[in-house]
Amino acid sequence: MRKTVAIFILVFAFLLASTTDLHAEVTIDWVTVVDSGNTPDDTGRGGVDYVYKIAKYEVTNSQYTEFLNSIADTDTYGLYNTEMASGYAGTGGITRSGLSGSYTYSARAGRENMPVNYVSYYDSLRFTNWLNNGQTSGLQDSSTTEDGAYTFTGATSVSGRKAGAKVFLTNENEWHKAAFYKGGSTNAGYWTYATQSNTLPNNNPPSADTSNSANYYNDGWAVGSPYLTDVGAYTLSDSAYGTFDQNGNMWEWNERIGDQSPAHRGASWVSQSGRLPRDYYSQSTPDNEIYSNGIRIAAVPEPLLGDLDGDGFVGITDLNIVLGAWNQSVPPGNPLADPSGDGFVGIEDLNFVLGNWNNGIPPSSSPVPEPGSLALLVVGMVAMLRRVA
Ligand SMILES: [Ca+2]
Ligand SMILES: [Ca+2]
Ligand SMILES: [Ca+2]
Ligand SMILES: [Ca+2]
């Protein structure tokens, strides 16, 4: 009987997997931005007191095409702009075919990994809602684009970032920190450019990347038509946290503050050098859909199992939390010491820590034990547990 049920569940899971996978899934490459509580710069930006993830790259045409194919058979909110089919200087990267109700979309050949453009601020928020909701397919409604990280109550009427949002547009501090902060401590200071440099980047083509290069206009284009570069093409010119193209290629929308026009940051393929520095601040009207505005997204980090003290790393301090309440009921034992949640601190909680040992990013202030001493520690633990058992 049990076997029959198990087989039934397997078959059901298989059917579910094979019928729901109508579109390729969008995967985002993330970097994790640590150094929580870092000092802002002299513009007042860049201080962030939580760990977050930010996309390594600008959103690409192929990613935005998957989005359109999931939710824009009928494009109620104009998430496709017909300029994408060609546009200014041929920089658009997505074509549409069919009639409303059965529209389909394709990235133009060779443009798949170039950044999407002709997206408004609202398009950007809807894209993050869709990711936040798990890339659901259907009409543009609350299950896909109209709710999630932000609640839309009309085409251009939208809430701020909601508590519990998982994927969202960068806010100004998140964007600024990832671009310019030097990292490594909470008072590390800021670079002038998003290439870990205080010297103006050159606009060499990616093939001649000097580790301080970006796609912008510097008495000439970085590359020939269609002028955009594949995201991450400047492989040597990343920021301290490992993001690419935060200077150049596309301007990148940030969450608006109150009723202000949202900022777009970092300059674009068509910008001149004065637009690149950290203290250059520019806003764009939220419904502006042009050839030089694109999207970068951010997200909350995955919960890190075994990181009991929440410092982003599983290590000695977490082990001490478990050992400090060993064999106790919770309460009075420290509730952090009971990640299994069974009200008692024991072997199952220890396994959360040892099973995820060394995961995450070590805080600069806490030394990582040498592998030798860690091995001794574990041997000691096992011996102790044997005796307990
Ligand atoms: Ca649009
Ligand atoms: Ca950019
Ligand atoms: Ca920890
Ligand atoms: Ca427990």
Image: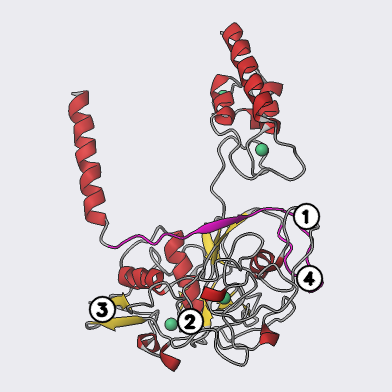
Q: Tell me the chief SS of the magenta region.
A: loop
Residue toward you, 247 or 288: 247
Q: Quadrant of residue 258?
A: bottom right
Report which residue position mark 1 lands on: 186
* Amino acid at the residue labelled 2: Leu
Find out whether the residues at labels 4 and 2 contact each other: C-beta distance under 8 Å.
no
Find out whether the residues at labels 2 and 1 contact each other: C-beta distance under 8 Å.
no
Ligand 2 sits in quadrant: bottom right
Report which residue position mark 4 lands on: 44
Q: CA distance from mark 2 to mark 1?
A: 35 Å
**Callout 2: SS:** loop
Q: Earlier in the sequence, mark 2 or mark 3?
A: 3
Left/right of residue 137 with respect to residue 209 in the rendered view:
left
Left/right of residue 38 with respect to residue 30 in the rendered view:
right
Horizontal and vertical percent position of residue 369: 70, 31
Residue 339 visible: no
Q: Earlier in the sequence, mark 1 or mark 4?
A: 4
**Callout 1: SS:** loop
Tell me the quarter of the image containing the N terminus.
top left
Report which residue position mark 3 lands on: 103
Graded by Cα atoms within 10 Å as few (under 14), some (14 to 19) or many (20 or more), the crowding at tag 2 reads: many
Report which residue position mark 2 lands on: 228
- Of the two numbered discs 2 and 1 in the rendering, the one whose residue sits closer to the viewer: 2
For the point 17% across and 28% down, which residue is it?
A: 4
* Amino acid at the residue labelled 1: Thr
Q: Earlier in the sequence, mark 2 or mark 1?
A: 1
Horizontal and vertical percent position of residue 383: 61, 11
Horizontal and vertical percent position of residue 35: 71, 53
Residue 58's place in the image compared with 351, above or below, is below
The span picked out in magenta is: 23-48
Q: Earlier in the sequence, mark 3 or mark 4?
A: 4
In this figure, what is the number of numbered marks?
4
